[in-house]
Image (cartoon, grey):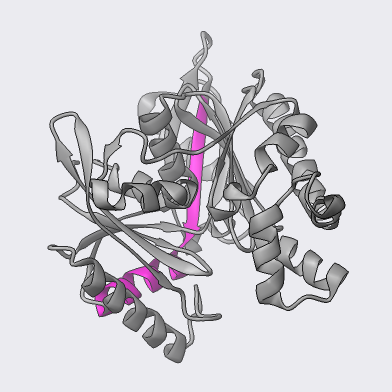
Amino acid sequence: MALPQHFAIDFGAHSLKLVNLAKKGNSWELKNIGSIQTPSEVLNSYKEEHKTQMVDAIKSLVAEAKVPYKEVAVALPESAVFSRVLTVPKVADAEVTDAVYWQLKQFLPYPIEDVQSDFTELTVDQNGQRKMLAVAAPKKLVELYVEILERAGLTPVAIESESLAILRSVKYAQDTKDAVILDFGSNTTDMAIMRGGELFFSQSIATGADLLTKALVNEFQLSYAQAEEYKRIYGMRSDAVDGKIRNAMKPVLDMIVTEVLRGIEFYKNEVGAVPPTLAILSGEAALLPALSEYLETILSYDVQLADPWKSIVVPNNIAEIVRKSSPAFTVAIGLCLKEE
């Protein structure tokens, strides 16, 4: 079913990002954009005072961006979403839903009655065996997002996982159908493997960009603000400050890389396919200097930055500002591109 015209809000631990695109023929054009600081410690909280703070922040963001309608699409944090490729033996089409249900029930870390789930058929082999991607999210969290958006005067028309939004954005902007995607968030690094344009694997790694900042705070006794500034200026450059900033952050990044390599191994064994050799970096921390080069060396992959604005018409007066933070908008743009 086709979605109505809508805009998108990406809920981040540090910022809420809003994007509104309009379709013109076969291309998309930026109409509205905005960003506001997320109130501290309120994201995904069920406390009434935190809900109120989030509602007020969303109202301010929407008013500032001057979006002309109320319909909105949002994404759930990948850490809260369960996804798995299931192997369903040959059954009649009418029995696929039941087969997925019983398998999903076995693998879910919580009761199946407490989740909203969906599935997509990925492949069918010559024996009629199907690979199905099943995705499930806690009903309680979905209801929280709906409540907050409705209290802010908005109408949620789509709620999906961040990985699905990112894949849609990458496919449209970079014409890529096979890639390992790493989305660097504040508290987590989310990994997805795309094959033939479909999501075949995703996981949330419980190490994010904030830990890189904390590593600098601890190593050099800096204030958090100073450490954040050093992180953004020097990143993983070995030629800056005698490589001291790089060396302090390296153990944290190596923790992430270890989990990425485990995910790739799991994908190889579970899906039985050769993994992609392209990695695409998304999220604000993807902009850290020399991060791509560092990951390229360790993973032996071609590593690229996500460029979600690449195929979108952006007004000249904000083009340079928008493109400087390009990977940070991958989720929001992917949500805007969702048409059904």
Q: Is residue 21 visible?
A: yes
Up the image or down, 150 lies above or below 84; here it is below
Q: Which residues are magenta?
A: 131-151
Picture quarter containing residue 290? top right
Up the image or down, 167 lies above or below 32; here it is above
Residue 199 point in image, percent of width and height: 50, 34
Q: Is residue 208 visible?
A: no
Residue 136 point in image, percent of width and height: 49, 52
Taking the view exactly as shown, the residue that stands out farthest to the top is 126
Q: Is residue 107 magenta?
A: no
Compared across the picture, whether 134 is left or right of 152 comes to right
Residue 100 point in image, percent of width and height: 49, 38
Q: Residue at point 39% right, 37% down?
A: 168
Q: Nearer the viewer, residue 231 or 4?
A: 231
Up the image or down, 301 lies above or below 99; here it is above
Q: Nearer the viewer, residue 298 or 96?
A: 298
Picture quarter containing residue 185? bottom right
Q: Nearer the viewer, residue 184 or 51?
A: 184
Compared across the picture, whether 255 is left or right of 53 comes to right
Quadrant occupied by the C terminus: top left
Q: How many numbered dots are placed on residues in this image?
A: 0
Q: Residue at point 50% right, 36% down?
A: 133
Q: Is residue 147 magenta?
A: yes
Residue 273 point in image, percent of width and height: 64, 19
Q: Residue at point 76% right, 69% down?
A: 214
Compared across the picture, whether 300 is left or right of 284 comes to right
Quadrant occupied by the N terminus: top left
Q: Residue at point 38% right, 69% down?
A: 145
